[in-house]
Image (cartoon, rainbow, N blue to C red):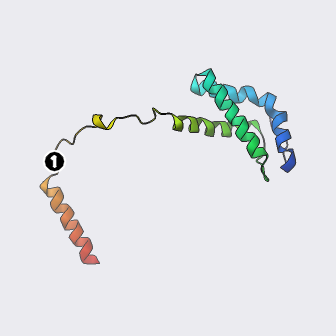
Amino acid sequence: MSAESDGDDAPRALLALYDDALPVVYGYFVRRCGDRGTAEDLTSETFLAAMDAARKATPPPISVRWLLGVARHKLADHYRRRPDRFSVPVAELPEPLDAPDDWDVELDRIVAESVLAKL
């Protein structure tokens, strides 16, 4: 499932491929998100990004496989934007169990002196 594309014909190629590609791209998002609303939004973003790419001076070869690559990047962007991505409050971080050992401080001093001596 691909459409020939060169310079000016890439947007037309994408439009010709749309009917075949839409269920594939949408299904990809539904399987990975489990949420139809999010899948619809990401599908729209994918086709908008694909049209932007197709309008460039040197467009990529338009195919369903390429669209799935665009979709994969849109899904990664979606998960990066999520506010709950790294939500570990600082107050819940564990305290260090032991104070640094005197030997660690001494070892750091010896290493620093050794490095300085080589300069």
In this rendering, does residue 39 appear at all? yes
**Amino acid at pointer 1:** Ala
62 on left or right of 106: right
- Residue 32, quarter of the rendered image: top right
Question: Which residue in the structure is indicated by mark 1?
Answer: 99
Locate residue 103, reporting x and y percent. 14, 57
Q: Nearer the viewer, residue 20 or 86?
A: 86
Locate residue 109, reporting x and y percent. 19, 65
- Residue 11, quarter of the rendered image: top right
In this rendering, does residue 3 appear at all? no
The residue located at (52%, 38%) in the rendering is 80
SS class, disc 1: loop
Task: For label 1, count other residues whose C-alpha is less than 10 Å away and answer few (under 14), some (14-19) or many (20+).
Answer: few
Locate residue 105, reporting x and y percent. 17, 59
11 on left or right of 101: right
What is the residue that sits farthest to the left in this orientation?
102
| Position above or below: 54 against 58 | above
Q: Nearer the viewer, residue 108 or 88?
A: 88
The residue located at (63%, 26%) in the rendering is 39
Locate residue 1, reporting x and y percent. 80, 34
The residue located at (34%, 35%) in the rendering is 89
Q: Nearer the viewer, residue 100 or 4?
A: 100
The residue located at (67%, 35%) in the rendering is 45
| Position above or below: 22 against 117 | above
